[in-house]
Amino acid sequence: MNKTSGSISRRELMVGTVAIGGLALLGTPKFSSAQTAGGVGAASTSGFDDLTSLIRGELILPGHDAYDEARKVWNGMIDKRPAAIARCSGAADVMDVVKYAREKNIPVSVRGGGHNVAGKALKDGAIAIDLAGLHGVRVDAAKKRARVQGGARWAAVDRETLAFDLVTTGGTVSATGVGGLTLGGGLGWIMRKHGLSCDNLMSADVVTADGRLLVVNEDENSDLYWAIRGGGGNFGVVTSFEFRLHDLEPITGGMAMYPQSMLKDMFHFYRDYTSTSPDSVSAGAGVIFGPPGTALEGQMAGVIIVCHKGPAGEGERLVKPIKDFGPPALDFIAPTTYKAQQSLLDASAPAGMRNYWRSNMMTELSDAALDALVARADELPPPGSMIFIEHMGGAVGRVGAQDTAFSNRHAKYNTSVFGTWVNADEDERNIAWVRNFGDELKQFSTGGAYVNYMAADEAAGNIKAAYEANYKRLTDVKRKYDPTNFFSGNQNIAP
Ligand SMILES: Cc1cc2nc3c(=O)[nH]c(=O)nc-3n(C[C@H](O)[C@H](O)[C@H](O)COP(=O)(O)OP(=O)(O)OC[C@H]3O[C@@H](n4cnc5c(N)ncnc54)[C@H](O)[C@@H]3O)c2cc1C
């Protein structure tokens, strides 16, 4: 291992194109290297010799050839320099790194799939507990359960469960980490039928702040089981998740796009459509940049994305209103596979772009809220930003508000502003725009937001509001399992 600390490379982004279902949707960042001096937060590399020999996995330190690659996360705006990156090989490594960091009084962060937009996977000067090596998935088809290691991505879960014609609710972009997504809730295409990802979590192995591994489920450490279903990474490192699986059924899905002149009508149609659609249908609607190579290239466009899980004939009938409305300028809704639906948005979310997000939970889509979305559409920062409404309700809303830490069960919609651009010199302007727009939409919200879409500078008050009445109980559980706030690199619940 190269232990010489030295210069780091800075990434420069350039834009190309990416194909999505035959469409070029967004710019793909390519990386070129330019050298710049390192140093911020870089610890003395020699100080970690004892940790290197303690763990089975690799310890990556500043100056190591792999360091710069290992500290990249999905959001290209995040440029943090951990003191060490501990690529854990198993629960034992996680337990030892936790105990080591506690003893030496070194802060830690926890990295699952590295997709958190706020870059919570890393912290300057901390040891990053990197779970990338823990990506195994084991399916028990007879019991309809899957054991998923803490650093797995959703693509791995789908790959393994689909081999047995089984599925569970996962994220809508297949590279997203199971860890952060599940612990914060987990919105996905089949949530209205089968609940959030966290609603399908039956059990977990959690390494707590004292370095012990606890089995957590309905019967054992049930207070922690309650808290990790929505409370984020506040309570420990999950080395393994056990999910309930559901039968795979035919999927009818895809997206339809509309010209900007139809935005208002499209949002009103979407509101009517989702107010009557059954739980087998999940649909989202928003505003995107028209994909290159299509009739909508370079224009603001409306989009409706739908997924029906159930008998094919029923699916065809239930998506027909979307295909009939307008009609759409582009219509890619058809019988499809679960895998295709789960990766439909992959190309629209390339790693390395600069991102800043805001979300607002809403019980209804009022005329005024929809007007605000239409009015602001023209201002979306190019090339990748979008406004998107996710339809919740169904099985998500049937779980009691206090049954899991995930709150806002009464919200029917999650309305998000996803700011995505390329150049650092646009950061200030674009961040301010997303922030202002998000604040403007707050008047139409429950007051809550989705913790997994929160930006780095989200106020503590917003985190508290996101948990509504569950916040107090979360602080109690935090005090019991992590009284010193050892796990603070998250949407933090202070003990
Ligand atoms: C392109 C994209 C698409 C997305 N789509 C969806 C979507 O469809 N539905 C949805 O609900 N969300 C979605 N999200 C948001 C997503 O839920 C969060 O970004 C989430 O944090 C990703 O998890 P991760 O493991 O990749 O995160 P990381 O950045 O690795 O981790 C973030 C934090 O999660 C915690 N954490 C992660 N793994 C563990 C673990 N094993 N044990 C303990 N703590 C852990 C830690 O606190 C960590 O700091 C999306 C995000 C992106 C970037």
Image (cartoon, rainbow, N blue to C red):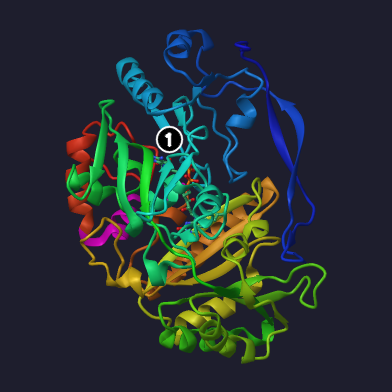
Is residue 446 visible from the viewing direction of this image?
Answer: no
Q: How far across and down, in percent of the image, does residue 486 sit?
A: 31, 31
Q: Amino acid at mark 1?
A: Val
Q: Is residue 462 left or right of residue 332?
A: left
The foreground one among 297 and 20 is: 20
Q: Is residue 257 left or right of residue 116?
A: right
Check the picture and name the quadrant holding the N terminus.
top right
Q: Is residue 13 above or below residue 356?
A: above
Q: Is residue 29 left or right of residue 408?
A: right
Check the picture and name the quadrant holding the C terminus.
top left
Q: Is residue 82 above or below residue 140?
A: above
Q: Secondary structure at mark 1?
A: strand
Displayed quadrant of residue 97: top left
> In the image, is residue 359 part of the stretch drawn in magenta?
no
> Which residue is at 46% across, 48% downward?
178
Displayed quadrant of residue 405: bottom left
Q: Which residue is mark 1?
A: 110
Q: Which residues are magenta?
A: 456-469
Q: How far across and down, in percent of the image, does residue 474 sit?
A: 22, 49
> In the image, is residue 457 part of the stretch drawn in magenta?
yes
Is residue 52 visible from the viewing direction of this image?
Answer: yes
Q: How far across and down, in percent of the image, does residue 150 sit?
A: 43, 40
The foreground one among 14 and 132 is: 132
Question: Would you say the beta carbon of the disc 1 residue lies within 8 angstroms of ligand 1?
Answer: yes
Category of crowding for the residue at label 1, using alpha-carbon neighbours closer than 10 angstroms: few (below 14), some (14–19), many (at least 20): many
The foreground one among 57 and 69 is: 57
